[in-house]
Amino acid sequence: MPKHTKSAASEAPETPDPTPDGAAGKRTAAAEGAVDGAAAIARGRPVVERKKKYLVAPRTALGGAFGASSWVAPLGLSAVQQALHALPDIDVVDTIATRGGMAPAGFGPASMGEPADGVVVARMTDQKAGELFQRGQGQLLVERDQHLELLDPMLRRPDLVNSLTPYQGPQAELLLAVVGKDGVPLADVEVSLFGGALPSTAVTGPDGVARLRLYGEDAHTISGLYVKPRTDYWSLYQRDPDLSLDEPNVVMVRALADWPALRGMPQQAALGWGARAMRLDQVPQQFRGRGVKIAVIDSGAATTHGNLNQIRSGFDVVNKQVDRSTWNVDTFGHGSHCAGVIAATDPAWGIRGFAPEAEIHVCKLFPGGQVSQLIDALEYCIEQGIDVVNMSLGGGSPSEALERQIVRARQAGVACIAAAGNSAAAVQYPASSPHVLAVAAIGNVHEFPPDSYHAETIGPDRDAQGYFTARFSCFGPQVDVCAPGVAIVSSVPPNNFAAWDGTSMAAPHVTGLAALVLAHRPEFQSMSLPRSPERVERLFQVLRMSARPVTVSDPNRIGYGLPDALVALGLPVAQPGMAWQSVAAGFGIPAGMFAGAPGDGARMGVGPPGIGAAGQPGAINYPFRALRSSGW
């Protein structure tokens, strides 16, 4: 480690003075470094503010070069693009044109009957963006193109972890070997130690051994050990581990297939606990989602996987200028995991998804996804006639440009379902938009090993059946429903399985059920429900009203509760006296929501006997979106 007794200059080696007479004596290497530094300054370039990507679009008709007197006859997006090209220090990098459909009221040209025609993506400094917005006098949308994130819960590190690395003092190397079934060493396993001077993380090599550096000579200060295999094994979390610095420490992790509910997987086909919790196991086998189009906007989907090789369509949004067809390369595995929950096939191998015969479209947005690219992906969904979109992603703050596109998608009959977020705080955007269905995450204590890291997600609201709200799940009045999002086993590249947590895993459960409802619930097959915003709202109503409260938490954390596949599909319910029926009715059921004779609501498990038409005995008149926030 470097010493602090001398400066770098005082320790520099001496070099002969090149002057002929030697009058200057000796010169240090530091002086030569100063000369080299001066040369670098002379040929370098000054550091200035970096240009960032901004979204620019008209809020109303405009012309000219965005001057105070330039608001004239209606012009389209091309006028905005031309004006931006003419302005100095602004680089136009992309134009996302929206074809077909109208913008929502209050969102610009559509309020005057003109088509909404998209956004221009341009690079500029923050100062330039501010000037542009001022010149637009509030009639020009100018907003930062935010980076989006996949909604994976981060490892919950202890409080008060500092960022200081000791410069001196005792250090030790701790060896930890990770072995799997039959004592086979496991490579690429992430190992983390908490406590002591600093947390320490390493990855096991081909020999299954991770080498972790500790500051200090005492391993008794370690308060936690986290072991996370990449695939096919359960994680492990050991509080206050008994570790040795004198010999290798060995950890044995359990295979996913050794868990009773997954016995024999993948050779023997299985159904995830989340699907069983939503009673997919009681749905007739012929209900498989045929005829419905689903888009998964995520990190791609690995069609090398035996459960995902039926996926044929996609669009690499991030890489579209080079190769749009690389949507089937999934470097994170996140999109593959979500796609597996939604629509994994079941050829007597692996884990079946909700809608294995639905037509899946993959829009690859990660790594590197931004709001502009999500707008582009949603435009693809509109053009392709997608029925349901899964968005297990989020951003830093609401976006007016993205909200306009979400509303356009809804008007085109595209139902957007979004993960609520994993920050254990307010619902993140876009899930907080009133135009999407927001999904929070729950778990069940009986569905994972108690020594796995999944146990760290258990919230304080566990009910008699073992359901709990995941600690990481976002909450608020925007939450519509909850779904399984802890220890969800699904497909990951290249042809493996992993148990992951997150509202990212919860949203696909609801997306898959939504596809089944659209494909098999009779009212969606009739001409009375064409592709429209009313069709989207009706779908959301069915999903909400099928839900039963779980955990002992309030609607801010679970919304209407956990959707039930049998109820949502209008199938007979085997247990008509389930306790949650009366609670669900308390949330309010719109009059005539379930067609049929009085009492049909109770037969389906969503209300008390005698629900009839408005004005008749037993009718309930209730504002359906009463639990939803009107703002975003």
Image (cartoon, rainbow, N blue to C red):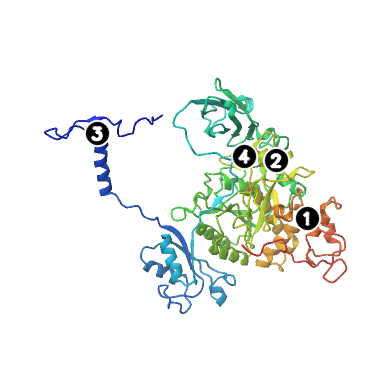
Residue 607 appears at what percent x and percent y?
83, 59
Q: Residue furthest top?
A: 246
Task: Kindly identify which residue carries mark 1.
Answer: 567
Quick one: quadrant of the C terminus?
bottom right
- Secondary structure at badge 1 equals helix
Label 1 to label 4: alpha-carbon separation? 30 Å
Looking at marks 2 and 3 on the same chain, the residue that comes earlier in the sequence is marked by 3
Task: Kindly identify which residue carries mark 2.
Answer: 270
Q: Foreground residue, 313 or 539?
A: 539
- Check disc 3 and give the amino acid type: Thr
Task: Please name which of the two marks, 3 or 1, marks the residue nearer to the observer.
Answer: 3
Label 4 to label 3: alpha-carbon separation? 59 Å
Dot 1 alpha-carbon crowd within 10 angstroms: few under 14, some 14 to 19, many 20 or more? many
- Secondary structure at badge 4 equals strand
Q: Is residue 355 visible?
A: no
Label 3 to label 1: alpha-carbon separation? 83 Å
- Check disc 2 and give the amino acid type: Ala
Residue 537 appears at what percent x and percent y?
69, 64
Mark 3 touching mark 1, by CB under 8 A? no
Decide: is 50 above or below 256: below
- Quarter-of-image position of residue 539: bottom right
Mark 4 touching mark 3, by CB under 8 A? no
Task: Kindly identify which residue carries mark 3.
Answer: 28
Quick one: quadrant of the N terminus?
top left
Q: Residue furthest bottom?
A: 73
Task: Please name which of the two marks, 2 or 3, marks the residue nearer to the observer.
Answer: 3
